Amino acid sequence: MNNNVIFGINGPVVTVRDTDSFEMMEMVHVGEQSLVGEVIGITDRLTTIQVYEETTGLRPGDPVTGTGAPMNVLLGPGIIDNIFDGIERPLKAIEEHSGAFISRGAKVTSLDIEKRWNVTMKVKVGDRLEGGQIYATLPETPIIEHRVMLHPALSGEVVEVKPDGEYTIFDTVAVLKDDAGKTHELTLCQQWPIRTSRPVKERLAPSVPLITGQRIMDTLFPIAKGGTAAIPGGFGTGKTMNQHQLAKWCDADIIIYVGCGERGNEMSQVLSEFGELIDPKSNRPMTDRTVLIANTSNMPVAAREASIYTGITLAEYYRDMGYHVAMMADSTSRWAEALREISGRLEEMPAEEGFPAYLPSRLAEFYERGGRADVLSGGEGSVTLIGAVSPQGSDFSEPVTQNTKRFTRVFWALDKALAYARHYPAINWIDSYSEYFNDLDPWFKENLGEDFVEYRNRIGALLQEESSLMEIVKLIGADVLPDDQKLVIETARVIRVGFLQQNAFHAEDTYVPLEKQKLMMKVILHLHSKAKEVVAREIPISKLIEQGMFDKLTKMKYDIPNDRLDMFDDYIREIDEKLGVFLQ
């Protein structure tokens, strides 16, 4: 008989009295319906458990059963093209069992245990296998090869290998004898605790950019593969929209999208959009390389806290196969609110704005699991972490935004004024920054030429100068400025409207290759240099604007197709002709 029974219930927090049966962070089953929970506190009198499902209907005296293992997820084929909740329960399978609403204690395996996979074995009897090495492969989707790896804690000699063929995830495909002489049956899956990062051979410097096709991100504020970025912004500034664009267009092999505490209608939009999208690289459905974790705001708060760890564990698993993975966390503020709610129920001493004192260390633990590495399977992989932050009232001084800035190296600050002016992406070029320039500039110079970095620096300097001049304009108006300063403002307008603003619904503008981004900067700066020569001859800037080149350059992003980059030469010739008249 189970003597461990519920003593008290406070929302998702359950206590058990007078027991030494449980370990810290152990996964447990609570109540008659075996709700999933995790041990988060132990004293000599009380064991505290957070339950990842709705606790309505639980009563004191209901049983609590330990599993003897930490909170973990099942890793194997079938993860991609699936939709999970925060503790890796597949929502499609749950819907078949319980209808539109998730029933409590739903007993559904994370991965399909009946589906047969076409397995190709990569080892033979007598081979020595170390932890993390690949012993079988199978096509998980038409564009992703699943590489079945030995659990990192195991190593030994292969003593039996099954022939190539069709197997389920729990079928034995090989047998390994470890150094102690114990045999282990190898299947197509393994379990891993979500709060423990997976090991790698060696961490690498972030020296390769994650190419997104979004001009302001690629050019002014780039992120590296294996890098970390924050997208903070108030309601309506486009955090989710930006993450959708990144998920659709960035050059990662696999996308993990975690909807953490977002509104249900937003998550349903993500699910329906991703189902319809065609991946531009493979011409296959986007879902063939995407994993969605849906944890909406009306789901149990404790599962919201777990969803971030579930997502990063899945990302590390595919990184270990040698893939470049991008994980979108939308949003880490909702995750921090879950921490605050559970902390309050545990009666812990609150820190700033009621958040627990360990908020910074939890954020650090999460972002530190990103990175680029030589992996145990013998290749190179990376996990790029992009976390949205939702500060109330767009107040970037609140604790989640400030602590996130400490642990991320790219800050794409969304601006409410830009969003209301329909300037998308609404990333403020003054408040944003990237700390990856020194790491990535050698790559840009090698692949795009020395002038790419020079153009970027000049574009940034013009935007900074315009920002300073606009402070003066607000006080005394633009008419009193000399023509060379008016020229800076006019060129900056072309940069803002023609370069930084991007139309996600335009076929040529939704994704822009780096070479086109470089040539757009080149043409804008060429116009500025020529106009500067003209203005130096005391010719009024109004005469230059009448030539129409400034307006024409704001539309070149639409007028020049991505595969017709030779057309930029025509623009340069036209600038020389129209402005050359004033220089004769």
Image: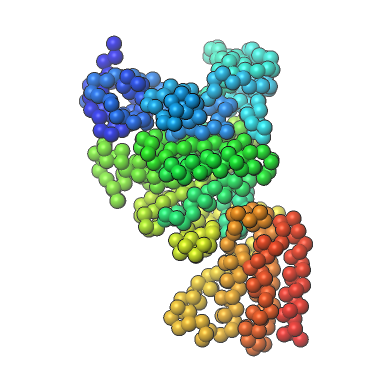
Q: Position of residue 417 (x, y in %)?
A: 45, 64
The structure residue drawn at horizontal position 36% and vertical position 25%, both measured from the top left corner, is 35
Q: Position of residue 75 (x, y in %)?
A: 53, 27
Tell me, yes or no, if residue 368 can be seen here: no
Seen in the picture, residue 511 relative to 464 is either above or below; the reply is: above
**Count of marks placed on residues:** 0
**Residue 74 relative to residue 550: left or right:** left
The structure residue drawn at horizontal position 72% and vertical position 80%, both measured from the top left corner, is 579
In this figure, which colouring scheme has been used for the structure?
rainbow
Quadrant hosting residue 235: bottom left
Residue at the far bottom in the pictured view: 538
Seen in the picture, residue 569 relative to 69 is either above or below; the reply is: below
Quadrant hosting residue 114: top right
Q: Quadrant of the C terminus?
A: bottom right
Q: Quadrant of the N terminus?
A: top left
The structure residue drawn at horizontal position 45% and vertical position 83%, both measured from the top left corner, is 476
Quadrant hosting residue 142: top right
Q: Position of residue 465 (x, y in %)?
A: 53, 73
Tell me, yes or no, if residue 182 can be seen here: yes
Q: Position of residue 15 (x, y in %)?
A: 26, 27
The structure residue drawn at horizontal position 64% and vertical position 53%, both measured from the top left corner, is 511
Seen in the picture, residue 287 relative to 472 is either above or below; the reply is: above
In this view, the residue in front, 20 or 526, is 526
